[in-house]
Amino acid sequence: MLKFYRTNPKQVLHVGDSASDVLGASREGIVTCWINRNNRVWEHDVKPDYIVQSLNEIEELLMTRKN
């Protein structure tokens, strides 16, 4: 998809709630956001770029990234 739309992976935010979501997007160079609704501990070497606890926090994150 990134190649098809000629999009820079650093201009894409992938939001996911599992390690496989974050790790897969990170491998492609995409900016990642982990939704940690249950206050879990991240136990992987590759860290998400952002961590939020709810979808409501995504709007603020996007507005911050825009500026």
Image: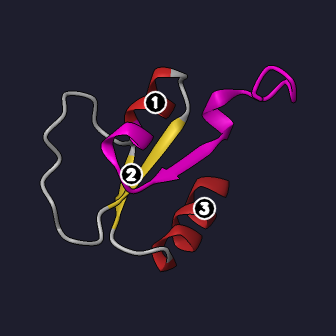
Crowd band around label 3 with a 10 angstrom C-alpha radius: few (<14), some (14–19), many (20+): few
Q: Earlier in the sequence, mark 3 or mark 2?
A: 2
Crowd band around label 2 with a 10 angstrom C-alpha radius: few (<14), some (14–19), many (20+): some
Look at the numbered disc 1 and give the secondary structure of its residue.
Answer: helix
Q: Disc 1 designates what residue?
A: 24
Q: Earlier in the sequence, mark 1 or mark 2?
A: 1
Q: Position of residue 45 (x, y in %)?
A: 19, 28
- Image height of 7 relative to 13, above or below: above
Q: Along the line of sight, which residue is nearer the eye, 25 or 61?
A: 25
Indicate the amino acid at tag 2. Answer: Tyr
Indicate the amino acid at tag 3. Answer: Leu
**Going 52% across and 38% down the picture, which residue do you hit?**
31
Q: Give the residues in magenta.
A: 1-22
Residue 20 in magenta? yes
* Left or right for 4, reference 57: right
Q: Disc 2 designates what residue?
A: 50
